[in-house]
Each structure stands twice: as structure tokens, then as C-alpha cells.
Image (spheres, rainbow, N blue to C red):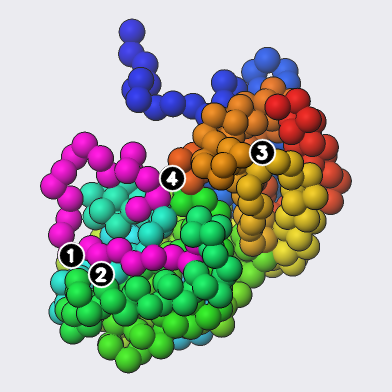
């Protein structure tokens, strides 16, 4: 009898019958408030009627048109529509399937466009599980261990993780920028550095937002040395942080961004965007793929962008994010060392009385929340951060419902 790989460990014991909005309905009849959103994917909630209708209509006319063989209307319409939401100047798009593919496409473009071999990533970042993306991932060794040798040319600089260092954000930012300069002096010469690759908010690394001075410091150094600034917006894009893209909180201009997750409300679709002149410097034949720009996924993405804009979901993410962050902070007890987040990305870090990571209690809190009807996930290097990622359609009442369950969890621990 065949079965899923035993290495795949489910975060919950639930088998889903169907999803609707912010809720998942299990085969045992129970309803769960889903604050995982498929790890930030179901941006418009489960089975939004407009997304469902767009996908159904597309399935009836064309499911797959391989996009280096033929073009199709949903993809062309999506590329045009992305121009209305992408940062100014990023008018050239390449579409793929997964976040890892997008990151590897951005890496390939940066190296080919600059002729430089090295990249700098930032400690705690997650960029994917394929070989190059896993090499650039430093949020935990579980993503890169056991299949060395990894890719060469990757160097790591600090991210301003103030809580971990025990410093103020100002001190952590000073340190991160100073150490980046040291990396460029001791590990990878600027003339050999193709790109800085960084998340606006560390995702798997513990839901740690960056800040304006840090990102503007990256931009200044990139401009000074001819280095490309690649912003990994796979988890932070499409309204998740209360801006359409996470980097917009920091007033910084990217050279390349990666997109995926919330782009298509659950259909596999990802991509990169860059200025046309920069994208044209990719080598012929270096971009492609069998399923990239799938017609049904593109139709779902068009509907997703329509829903995000017409229902005001970016503003809702900002408002409900403030409500959620304030509520989790107000309920934090002595088991929680830090609560942080941006928009609808909120993390509660569990620590021992001596300040050490408390993985066991975080896991117990996540399991207990599931038992009480609230789906959550953990993250962070030690998996001691419980993260909350509701769909962008979440209401004030649903935030209150989640906070009531979270309070009960903390009381019972």
C-alpha cells in the first residue's frame, strides 16, 4: 500500500472536507478558524466565489498552454494587470510555479546581468528548498542539511533581529549595517557581489520585520557598489503586511522582486519582476518551464487582484493586523518573551525564564489551539515562535474569536 513520505510531518491531525472563507471544515464535522492560510497562500480566503468562478470558467476553455510554445489570454492579461500593482519601474515579468523557482530565477538573472558570482543573504531568511534557494536559506539547518555540497558564492550578513541580540532596534540596525560592510570587506568584494537578497519580514525565521533605516542602508550600499537589491516578497506580497508589498513600509526601491503565495489564492503561481532593461540581460534560454504561467492559475490570479482591490483587503490587513498584534501583546504572559509582526503576520516567541528558546511550550500552545478550533503554525530557528497568518478577508469578529481561543490556550498551558 502506498502512502505519503514518512518525512512529511503534518502540523495538525486534520483532514479537510472543504474550506470557506476563514474556516476549514474537517471530515469529522468540526469547523476550524484557519490562521495559517496555507502558509500565507489563501489571501482571499478559502474558495472565494470570484476566484472559484474565474478558475471554473478558464478550465472550460484552456487548462494548459505552455507559454514558450503558445501565448494565452489569461497570462497576457495578468502580466498587464500586474503593471498596476508592481513597484514603479518593474515592468518586465517572468512567471513560474513556486517560490523556490522564483528565487532561483532572481538569482540567475542577478548573476547573468551583473557578471558577478556572489550574493549576500541575511541571517534568518527563508528562500526555498531547492539547492540554490536552500543554500540561501538560513532560518534553520533543516532546510539545507544532508545534501551537501551546496551552492558556492553565498555569504551571510546579519538581519536586525533586536530581540535575539537583546538590543534596541537602533542598536541591532547599526550592527547589521556595520557587519554588512565587514562582509563586503572580508568575504565578498563589492565588484564580485551580484545581489543582496532579503525578505522585508523574516518569515520562517520568526516573523521579524525589518525597518526603514536598515533597508535604506541596503539600497545605499547597493547603489554605491552596483549591486542589485532583490526583495523576496513571496510571503509578504499581495497585501499581507498592510501594504501591497512589504518593502513599501520602508520606502525602498527594489531592482528585482519575487512573488508567489498570495498571488493566486492557492493556485501554484510565482514570478519575478524587474526593469525591462535588466530582465533583457538574462541569457537566452535561461527562463522557461513547463507549467509556468498556467492558464487556470493566471485566471485565478487576475480574480485575486480584483478581490484584493475591490474589497479593500490591503487596508483590512493593516487594520486587522493592528488589532491582532495589540491583542496578542495584551495577552502575552511570562512564557512569551516577544510579540512582533507587520500587518497580518504576527508571531509570539516562547522563551524560558532565563530567556532561552522554549520549543516545547510553543509546540504545546500550537497543538492546544488546534484542539480548541484555531489553526496556527510555528516558525523560527528553534520553532519556538507561534505565528498567526489569517486570510486578508478576516473580520474584527474573527480576530476576537481567535484571541479568545489564544487566551484560553495561554491560561491552560
Who's the residue at 74% across and 45% down the image? 332
Q: For mark 3, what is the residue?
A: 335
Q: CA distance from mark 4 to mark 1?
A: 23 Å
Give the dominant element type of the magenta stretch: helix, strand or loop.
loop
Q: Where on the picture, by quarter, is residue 120?
A: bottom left
Q: Where on the picture, by quarter, is residue 292?
A: bottom left
- Residue 5 percent across, percent down from the top left: 34, 22
Mark 2 or mark 1: name the one nearer the start of the chain: 2
Q: CA distance from mark 2 to mark 4?
A: 22 Å
- Say which of marks 4 and 1 sits in front: 4
Q: Are marks 2 and 1 in contact (CB under 8 Å)?
A: yes
Figure quadrant of the C terminus: top right
Q: Residues in magenta?
A: 138-161
Relative to 65, is 31 on the left or the right?
right
Residue at the top extreme, as displayed = 1
Mark 2 or mark 3: name the one nearer the start of the chain: 2
Q: For mark 4, what is the residue?
A: 381
Q: Residues within 10 Å of mark 3 (few under 14, many from 20)?
A: some
- Say which of marks 2 and 3 sits in front: 3
User: Residue 119, labelled with which disc?
Assistant: 2
Amino acid at each position: 500500500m502506498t502512502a505519503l513520505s514518512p518525512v512529511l510531518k503534518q502540523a495538525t491531525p486534520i483532514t479537510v472536507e472543504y474550506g470557506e472563507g476563514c474556516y476549514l471544515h474537517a471530515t469529522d464535522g468540526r469547523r476550524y478558524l484557519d490562521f495559517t492560510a496555507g502558509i500565507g497562500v489563501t489571501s482571499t480566503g478559502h474558495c472565494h466565489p470570484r476566484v472559484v468562478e474565474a478558475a471554473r470558467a478558464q478550465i472550460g476553455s484552456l487548462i494548459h498552454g505552455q507559454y514558450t510554445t503558445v501565448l494565452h489570454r489569461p497570462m497576457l492579461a495578468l502580466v498587464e494587470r500586474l503593471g498596476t500593482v508592481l513597484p514603479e519601474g518593474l515592468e518586465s515579468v517572468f512567471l513560474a510555479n513556486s517560490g523556490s523557482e522564483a528565487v532561483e530565477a532572481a538569482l540567475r538573472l542577478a548573476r547573468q546581468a551583473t557578471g558577478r558570482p556572489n550574493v549576500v543573504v541575511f541571517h534568518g531568511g527563508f528562500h526555498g528548498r531547492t539547492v540554490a534557494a536552500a543554500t540561501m536559506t538560513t532560518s534553520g539547518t533543516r532546510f539545507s542539511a544532508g545534501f551537501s555540497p551546496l551552492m558556492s558564492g553565498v555569504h551571510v550578513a546579519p538581519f536586525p533581529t533586536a530581540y535575539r541580540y537583546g538590543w534596541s532596534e537602533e542598536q541591532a540596525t547599526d550592527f547589521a549595517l556595520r557587519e554588512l560592510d565587514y562582509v563586503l570587506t572580508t568575504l565578498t568584494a563589492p565588484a564580485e557581489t551580484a545581489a543582496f537578497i532579503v525578505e522585508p519580514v523574516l518569515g520562517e525565521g520568526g516573523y521579524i520585520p525589518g525597518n526603514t533605516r536598515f533597508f535604506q542602508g541596503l539600497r545605499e550600499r547597493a547603489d554605491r557598489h552596483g549591486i542589485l537589491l532583490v526583495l523576496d516578497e513571496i510571503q509578504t506580497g499581495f497585501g499581507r503586511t498592510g501594504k501591497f508589498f512589504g518593502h513599501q513600509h520602508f520606502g525602498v526601491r527594489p531592482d528585482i522582486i519575487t512573488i508567489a503565495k498570495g498571488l493566486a489564492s492557492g493556485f501554484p503561481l510565482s514570478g519575478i519582476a524587474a526593469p525591462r532593461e535588466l530582465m533583457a540581460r538574462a541569457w537566452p534560454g535561461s527562463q522557461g518551464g513547463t507549467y509556468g504561467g498556467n492558464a487556470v492559475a493566471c485566471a485565478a490570479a487576475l480574480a485575486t487582484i480584483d478581490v484584493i482591490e475591490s474589497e479593500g483587503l490591503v487596508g483590512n490587513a493593516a487594520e486587522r493586523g493592528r488589532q491582532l498584534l495589540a491583542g496578542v501583546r495584551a495577552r502575552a504572559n511570562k512564557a512569551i518573551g516577544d510579540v512582533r509582526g507587520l500587518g497580518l503576520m504576527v508571531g509570539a516567541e516562547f522563551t524560558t525564564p532565563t530567556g532561552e528558546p522554549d520549543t516545547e511550550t510553543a509546540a504545546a500552545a500550537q497543538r492546544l489551539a488546534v484542539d480548541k478550533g484555531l489553526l496556527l503554525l510555528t516558525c523560527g530557528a528553534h520553532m519556538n515562535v507561534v505565528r498567526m497568518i489569517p486570510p486578508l478577508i478576516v473580520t474584527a469578529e474573527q480576530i476576537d474569536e481567535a484571541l479568545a481561543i489564544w487566551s484560553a490556550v495561554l491560561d491552560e498551558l
